[in-house]
Image (cartoon, rainbow, N blue to C red):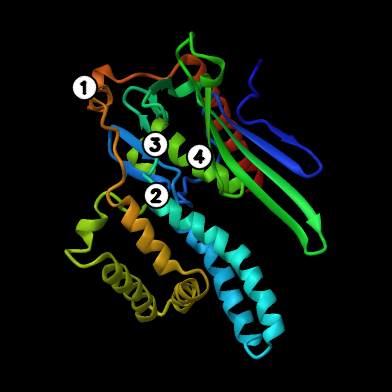
Amino acid sequence: MSKPTAGTTKKGIFSRNDYLAPLPIPTGRNPSDVLNIIWRKNEVFLDIGNYSIGSAVMVLWPMVMLFAFMGYLFRNDHDEMHIFAVMTTFIIGVPTFFLIQGLFREVPLPIRFNRQRREVCVPRDNGEYWIVPWESVTAAATQQSSVSQAGKTTMGLLVIGFENPDPDATQDNKHFSLGFNCGGGTTAMALWECMRSYMEIGLHVLPQTNDFEGGRAKLRGRSVVWGITCEYLDGIRHHLVAQEVGKAAWLIIGAIFLGAPLAMMLQEWKLSPPPDLSHPDIIEWSKPLPPEQWAKRSPELEVAIAKREAELAGRVEAQE
């Protein structure tokens, strides 16, 4: 089956699919790690993970605040309070149970992008590792919309796919895909650009991200709870001193209505340091190479990138 060409878009009445790779050509967006998926980065490789306990907290926290407020309103109505307690148990209790369960599971291993070899290491659940050519990786930004009385709701993913290089692999072990809940569209393109720009341009183009690897050291011996709390309060104070009232207000809103400090604490606890790929073959594969041994782009990708860059430059000139 032929794969959609990178740079093409398929639109439906309530859907949109933007195909980003193969071949991995520029999207025209700046790289942005909106989900903190970059766990480790250096001149040789980039580790990308899809474990975000912090995001789960920030989704659950507003519901906790809402039900706490509703509980305050119903506190004197015993009949309504019984119904409210049952609702709270199912709507808040079940997600909380799965969240706590996730805290005690091992963090899944990251996918490693090696820019010097132009290959990707994909760890599998059975302990197997796939080494996949970078230019064979597929990527698409998918977006689905629905309309209700509350208005239009849009959800989307960045989906990255890999194919098992073993020609004798069983049917259920030939493909693997990873989805990132980033909303699709331009946000998914910006997230994909973190990987594409790193592989095609270099480490320097990546945005500033959380230092999960050095997180515990950064706290200088303080407890995670106290350290994160101090850093969060310092951030608010810094914005106020700089007269950046809007940014300070956003941090305060994030703390009250999104549980941002708690999300940061749990993320720090689970991902500082992030899990590493410890198989001897992968450790050897991850070592730096002399520049003369670095893999090069294929001629097809060179042509595709040049064509895409010309298209993007034409758009900019047309807008000006």
Image quarter for residue 224?
bottom left
In the image, residue 268 above or below residue 43? below
What residue is disc 4 on?
Answer: 192
**Image coordinates for residue 82, horizontal then vertical, percent:** 66, 78
Q: Which badge, 3 or 2, comes first in the chain's sequence? A: 3
Q: Which mark is residue 216?
A: none
Q: Is residue 121 visible?
A: yes
Q: Are marks 3 and 2 in contact (CB under 8 Å)?
A: no
The residue furthest bottom is 76
In this picture, residue 296 sits left or right of residue 64? left
In this picture, residue 296 sits left or right of residue 220? right
Front of the two marks 4 and 3 = 4
Q: Which badge, 2 or 1, comes first in the chain's sequence? A: 2
Between the C-alphas of marks 1 and 4, the distance is: 27 Å
Q: Is residue 25 visible?
A: no
**Image coordinates for residue 187, horizontal then vertical, percent:** 57, 48
Between the C-alphas of marks 2 and 4, the distance is: 12 Å
Q: Which mark is residue 198?
A: 3
Between residue 95 and residue 112, name the one nearer to us: 95
Between the C-alphas of marks 4 and 3, the distance is: 10 Å
Q: Are marks 2 and 1 in contact (CB under 8 Å)?
A: no
Q: Amino acid at mark 4?
A: Trp
In the image, residue 115 above or below residue 179? above
Q: Which badge, 1 or 4, comes first in the chain's sequence? A: 4
Q: Amino acid at mark 3?
A: Tyr
Task: Residue at 78% x, 64% y: name it.
Answer: 150
Task: Residue at 34% x, 76% y: name it.
Answer: 233
What residue is disc 1 on?
Answer: 290
Q: Are marks 4 and 3 in contact (CB under 8 Å)?
A: no
Q: Quadrant of the N terminus?
A: top right
Task: Residue at 67% x, 86% y: name it.
Answer: 78
Q: Which mark is residue 207?
A: 2
